[in-house]
């Protein structure tokens, strides 16, 4: 009887140990899953690759508070400009792939390879959300003799290199749009370099340029003040706030092969970030991007809502990269051939 009781006690003890082991294992798995489910547990940092006051900074600081409402944690935005945004890209790349450091970027990393700026680029990051696309315009001073885009193009064709156009360098908005126009019309321009859109606009208003390319918000603001005349919007349809201004395809249908085109803005995270964290960020920023407040902001800033993530977003920036990189190559402005970087030529 004593022996039977002893055996029963031992058996019961073994069952207890087995149960504890099983509970311990289950607890460990639950904890591992909870780490992903509980993300984020601390403040998230958003690194803006351009300085304060620009298009990307404005866009980022509008979406930030809206996303913060859904993230259940603070989202702190910081500017790290320099080297065409490459300093911020390198900074985020050097951080852990844990979803706590996000890259707020414009389109520039898509061109780092062909411009020889950095080996890093969008290929090293996962697109959480491409928020919106900007629209470019061709403008002249308010008292310019050019009344239409056709007037400007005819003069440029008759006098190669005469028309002075502002430029912020290869890959910049003015250079790329002017190259597009030159490609489809066989016209040549005197590209005058400036450190940014602001100085180029100042030169235009001072009568030192014949024309330039501006982002839509700046064009609208200066047109309303009578300082510039907008000759065309680089889009395949007219813009609500500039209904009297023709889309570039109305005069030049061949431009359609480059469109839609324009600066774009979005949020990225390192490629090897855990999938559950990527998905969490995608869901939360999608809610922020679709917020009526943000959509209203886009409408009044002359931007087109995009709202793409994952593979769709990758295809979006790759299409933009193909158009722009090969334009730079054909214009002799690329330091590395797009072909050497396996960038497909689509146009």
Image (tube, rainbow, N blue to C red):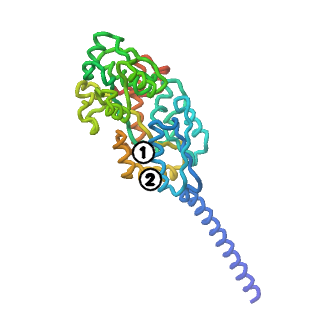
Q: x and y percent of residue 285 in the render? A: 45, 50
- Residue 319 visible: no
Structural crowding at the residue carrying mark 2, measured as other residues with C-alpha within 10 Å and reported as few (<14), some (14–19) or many (≥20): some
Q: Secondary structure at mark 2?
A: helix
Residue at image coords 32%, 15%? 187
Q: Residue furthest top?
A: 159
Q: Is residue 292 visible?
A: yes
Res 203 → quadrant: top left
Q: Which quadrant is home to the C terminus? A: top left
User: At which x and y percent is residue 23?
Assistant: 63, 69
Say which quadrant the N terminus sits in: bottom right
Task: Tell me the tag on residue 11.
Answer: none
Give how far across and how far down residue 62 sits, in percent: 45, 46
In this rendering, is residue 220 above or below 337? below
Furthest-bottom residue in this view: 1
Residue 222 in picture, x, y percent from top left:
35, 31
Name the residue beneath numbered marker 2: 283
Give the alpha-carbon distance from disc 1 to disc 2, as whole Å: 10 Å
First in sequence: mark 1 or mark 2?
2
Which residue is most to the right? 2
Q: How many marks?
A: 2
Residue at figure coordinates x 30%, y 20% from the top left: 144
Q: Is residue 47 above or below residue 74?
A: above
To which residue does mark 1 refer?
309
CB-based contact (under 8 Å), mark 1 and mark 2: no
């Amino acid at each position: 009887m004593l022996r039977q009781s002893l055996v029963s006690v031992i058996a019961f003890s073994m069952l207890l140990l087995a149960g504890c082991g099983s509970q311990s294992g289950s607890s460990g798995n639950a904890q591992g899953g909870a780490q992903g489910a509980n993300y984020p547990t601390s403040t998230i940092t958003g690194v803006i690759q351009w300085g304060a006051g620009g298009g990307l900074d404005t866009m980022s600081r509008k979406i930030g508070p809206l996303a913060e409402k859904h993230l259940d944690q603070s989202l702190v935005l910081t500017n790290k400009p320099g080297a065409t945004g490459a300093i911020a890209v390198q900074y985020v790349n050097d951080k852990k792939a844990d979803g706590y450091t996000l890259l707020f970027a414009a389109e520039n990393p898509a061109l780092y390879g062909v411009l020889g700026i950095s080996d890093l680029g969008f290929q090293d990051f996962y697109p959480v959300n491409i928020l919106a696309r900007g629209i470019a315009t061709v403008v002249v001073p308010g008292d310019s003799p050019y009344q239409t885009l056709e007037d400007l193009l005819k003069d440029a064709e008759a006098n190669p290199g005469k028309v002075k156009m502002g430029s912020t360098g290869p890959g910049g908005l003015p250079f790329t749009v002017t190259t597009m126009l030159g490609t489809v019309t066989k016209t040549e321009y005197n590209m005058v370099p400036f450190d940014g859109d602001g100085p180029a606009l100042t030169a235009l208003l001072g009568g030192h340029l014949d024309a330039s390319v501006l982002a839509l918000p700046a064009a609208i603001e200066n047109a309303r003040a009578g300082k510039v005349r907008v000759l065309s919007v680089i889009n395949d349809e007219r813009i609500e706030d500039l209904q009297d201004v023709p889309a570039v395809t109305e005069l030049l249908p061949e431009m359609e092969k480059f469109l839609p085109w324009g600066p774009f803005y979005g949020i990225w995270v390192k490629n090897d970030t855990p999938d559950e964290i990527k998905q969490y960020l995608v869901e939360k920023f999608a809610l922020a991007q679709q917020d009526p407040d943000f959509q209203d902001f886009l409408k009044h800033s002359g931007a087109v809502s995009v709202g793409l993530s994952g593979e769709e977003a990758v295809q979006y920036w790759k299409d933009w990269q193909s158009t722009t990189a090969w334009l730079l190559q054909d214009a002799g402005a690329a330091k590395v051939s797009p072909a050497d970087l396996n960038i497909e030529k689509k146009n």
